[in-house]
Image (cartoon, grey):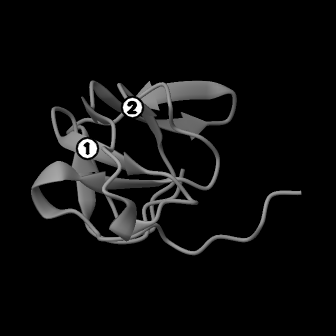
Amino acid sequence: GRIYSGTIQKNDTVVVIPRDYDPESGRALPSSTISGVFVNRGINRTELDPPIASAGDIVTLAGVPDSMKVGDTLTLKSNQVLKPLETPPIT
């Protein structure tokens, strides 16, 4: 996915905010630790060295929660955004 702001790196603890999440619901959000940061070069997937990516990069992450779906927001647990980013509807 595309990184819209900040950075992400291996061993960061992240939280998934579903695209339909209502901050007032009090619903618990799943978290996980990133175990790898990869980029695609043609048909090959290469682990970044150092394993850190910044805003604008398009990356593949290992270790994200299984519950993550297209359009969900991934945010650092230590510096969470409060609501999901607005994304186009999935049809």
Kindly report the distance in space between the C-alpha atoms of the residues bearing marks 2 and 1: 8 Å
Q: Mark on residue 62?
A: none
The dot on residue 14 is 1
Q: Amino acid at mark 1?
A: Val
Q: Are marks 2 and 1 in contact (CB under 8 Å)?
A: yes
* Circle 1 Cα neighbour tier, 10 Å, few/some/many (<14 / 14–19 / ≥20): many
Mark 2 highlights which residue? 64
Q: Nearer the viewer, residue 12 or 44?
A: 12
Residue 74, position as x, y percentages in the image: 39, 52
SS for callout 1: strand
Q: Is residue 74 visible?
A: yes
**Residue situated furthest right in the rendering:** 91
Which quadrant of the view contains residue 73? bottom left
Between 28 and 3, the one nearer to me in the picture: 28
Mark 2 belongs to which amino acid? Val
Q: Residue at x 43, y 61 (%)?
A: 3
Kindly identify the residue that appears in the image at 39 percent across and 70 percent down: 83
Q: Quadrant of residue 87?
A: bottom right
Which badge, 2 or 1, is on the more N-terminal residue?
A: 1
**Residue at image x 40%, y 29%?**
65
